[in-house]
DNA sequence: ATGAAAGCGCTAACAT
DNA sequence: ATGTTAGCGCTTTCAT
């Protein structure tokens, strides 16, 4: 004797075949209808769409990706999330890519070579359609980035690039940013401007150094090696840099720090020593992190128009995706930074 | 007459079939060998591995994902990248997931319902194996989150959760954090503690309010509605909150702000008014953003052990992945916050 | 305007 | 220990 037993219905995901069965068409017609292929009549399309809706269908991007070879995803590798700088760039990238139907997969390198390599591996395995990278501080060889090019995956370097790698670039004019900042300090009457520099193998930092020097040169002031202190620019570095200047007995009447964190830490150290800011020492930072407007005195800094930068990256992707073959080089996109003058540097 | 013509060799990606052909085995053996299946002899495995290496093979995660139904990716949706808070949580998640061979796909909701919904849609289309969400400030209905549960995708709510949704949770003990902060201010002698609160429909903010009130109650101080000012807690809000207190002529000798940005903005406003901190007004913030140690006076705040929180999320995922069926509920994981006492609140 | 059939690259149940 | 075979869900060429 047989009795019908209700199986514990495993809620299988709906596929185009289910819709095909339900609607009486075939899977290909369903596929075409959902893609709004012109060859499908409006009536059929609308019918199929309503079935899809009712049956709660969501297309399987994995299957689609396997078939078409396009994942409609791009990957972005950044050093760290904990800077408004990168957050804002990604915001710009996402805004544009989303409109074009792309998802953005973000990975952190923690400024380490190994993590960066691993992130790239993961993105390539996920078969993303393009990869954008701001290279890690510790990265000094580029074989892992070369892999991307070898596989003909569109590659964009942004912010931190590397001279050793040719590729598409979206960068800030760090030279101009640093030069403007330094010129501003000079115009405020500073003559001995300490420069808290970042690691000089980074393209951005190298260019900031050139900008600093160019400003000095323009005003006929000799570059003084003692005033340039190279650090990792993390939170504590401004503090130790100021201490170093004092220990060495080096006089200074201004600071240009290539990082806001470093600048604020320096400011705090000087205030503890009773140094008046900006009267005795004027300070300018770099990046326009939100807290710079909140410290006392408010920190002058250089805004990098990060959101625009992100949009530029995304737009470049859209251009690259249209090309059959990846062009090995296009002119870099260079964005202009903007000096934000606040109380920390205004002597007059 | 025939001549051999060299075709412009399209560098096709290497598949297991190519390796099979080159090594003389079949695709399944290659697949097994590369997965280190025990049934394949060491000799064969090593041979195949060397072929793979030489031929520059990378496995196609998309194909593998389609076949196995597992993507080895998880998705994380956060409101915004521009807080060290979320950056650090993600760092914790990534550390653990990577070790287990998972990639992490991160999306921003910008605190908007629509973006959050869109992010979830993208993650589900990518067929991630699990989704972790810290819900957007503007989200007030949860149908999109319900979708995740409907599809039986492991779901973890972290930090900001919602009472309306049952699900796995990893949260901070916001109640305790706020209570400790307020008690500390009371112990410093404050009697009229202004409370700069966040939007009260957020679970975290609601709990902080309860903590604030509990501390007052414990010390026998009546809650004064005038002292509680609800804002979005963004950068400018601390400033306007202080202005409001002055306009209304409400006296206060302490501030507990549910955000570091708000706290620092308030501090700055008061300093401009010539109010001494912490002498006249003691201040405590929330989150321990890195810049809080850099302002003058350094800001007392509540550290939320974000990295641990991220690790807890990841570990919970690993547990959930092992279950055949998703348990509808497990006890929430509640992490203890830590009060960081700095100069801004030390009267004694 | 719609259908049939093949295949993207991989894995796994079922052989042997 | 290795091979055969089928199929994940989709797109797309070729038919009609």
Image (cartoon, coloured by chain):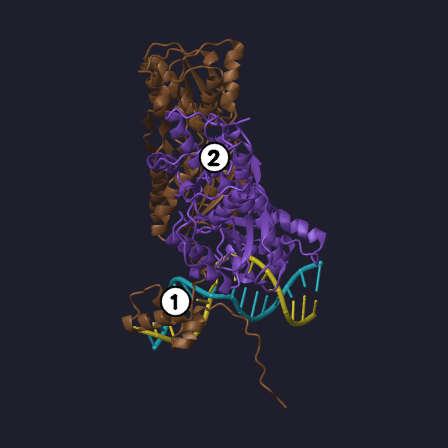
Chain colours: A brown, B purple, C yellow, D cyan
User: What residue is disc 2 on?
Assistant: A135
Q: Which of the 4 quarters of the picture holds residue B327?
A: bottom right
* Image height of A272 relative to D12, above or below: above
User: Chain letter of disc 2?
Assistant: A
**Does B222 sit left or right of A304 as displayed?**
right
- How many numbered marks have been drawn onto this rendered protein structure? 2
Task: Tell me the quadrant of the picture where the N terminus of chain B can be found.
Answer: bottom left
Whether residue B90 can be seen here: no
**Does A143 sit left or right of A104 as displayed?**
right
Whether residue A205 can be seen here: yes
User: What residue is disc 1 on?
Assistant: A31
Q: Are marks 2 and 1 on the same chain?
A: yes
Q: At which x and y percent is residue A158?
A: 41, 36
Q: Rate crowding at label 1 as few (under 14), some (14 to 19) or many (20 or more) other CA atoms within 10 Å.
A: some
User: Chain letter of disc 1?
Assistant: A
Query: Closer to the camera, B226 or B155?
Result: B226
Query: Closer to the camera, B222 or B291?
Result: B222
Q: At which x and y percent is residue A300?
A: 36, 24
Distance from disc 2 to disc 1, alpha carbons, whole Å, reads 40 Å
User: Is the C-beta separation of discs 2 and 1 under 8 Å?
Assistant: no
Q: At which x and y percent is residue B148?
A: 48, 60
| Residue ID at (39%, 69%) | A52
């Amino acid at each position: 004797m047989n009795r019908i037993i209700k199986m514990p219905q495993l809620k299988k995901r709906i596929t185009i075949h289910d819709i095909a069965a339900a609607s009486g068409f075939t899977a290909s017609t369903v596929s075409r209808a959902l893609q709004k292929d012109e060859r499908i009549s409006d009536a059929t399309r609308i019918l199929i769409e309503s079935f899809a809706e009712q049956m709660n269908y969501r297309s399987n991007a994995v299957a689609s990706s396997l078939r078409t070879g396009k994942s409609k995803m791009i990957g972005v590798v950044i050093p760290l999330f904990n800077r408004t700088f990168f957050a804002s760039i990604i915001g710009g990238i996402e805004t544009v890519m989303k409109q074009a139907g792309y998802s953005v997969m973000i990975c952190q390198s923690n400024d380490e070579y190994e993590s960066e390599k691993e992130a790239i591996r993961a993105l390539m395995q996920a078969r993303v359609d393009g990869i954008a990278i701001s290279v890690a501080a510790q990265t000094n060889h580029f074989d892992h980035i070369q892999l991307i090019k070898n596989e003909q995956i569109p590659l964009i370097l942004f912010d931190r690039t590397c001279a050793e790698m040719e590729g598409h670039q979206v960068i800030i004019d760090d030279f101009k940013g640093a030069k403007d900042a330094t010129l501003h300090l000079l115009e405020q009457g500073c003559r001995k401007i300490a420069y808290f520099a970042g690691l000089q193998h980074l393209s951005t930092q190298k260019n900031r150094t050139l900008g600093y020097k160019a400003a000095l040169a323009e005003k006929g002031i000799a570059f003084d090696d003692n005033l340039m202190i190279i650090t990792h620019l993390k939170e504590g570095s401004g503090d130790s840099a100021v201490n170093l200047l004092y220990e060495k007995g080096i006089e200074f009447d201004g600071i240009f720090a290539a990082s806001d964190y470093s600048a604020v830490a320096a400011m705090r150290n000087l205030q503890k020593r009773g140094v008046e800011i900006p009267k005795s020492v004027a300070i300018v930072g770099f990046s326009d992190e939100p807290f710079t407007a909140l410290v006392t005195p408010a920190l002058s800094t250089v805004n990098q128009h990060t959101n625009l930068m992100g949009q530029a990256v995304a737009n470049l992707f859209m251009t690259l995706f249209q090309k059959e073959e990846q062009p090995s080089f296009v002119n870099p996109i260079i964005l202009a930074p903007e000096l934000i003058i606040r109380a920390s540097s205004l002597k007059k």
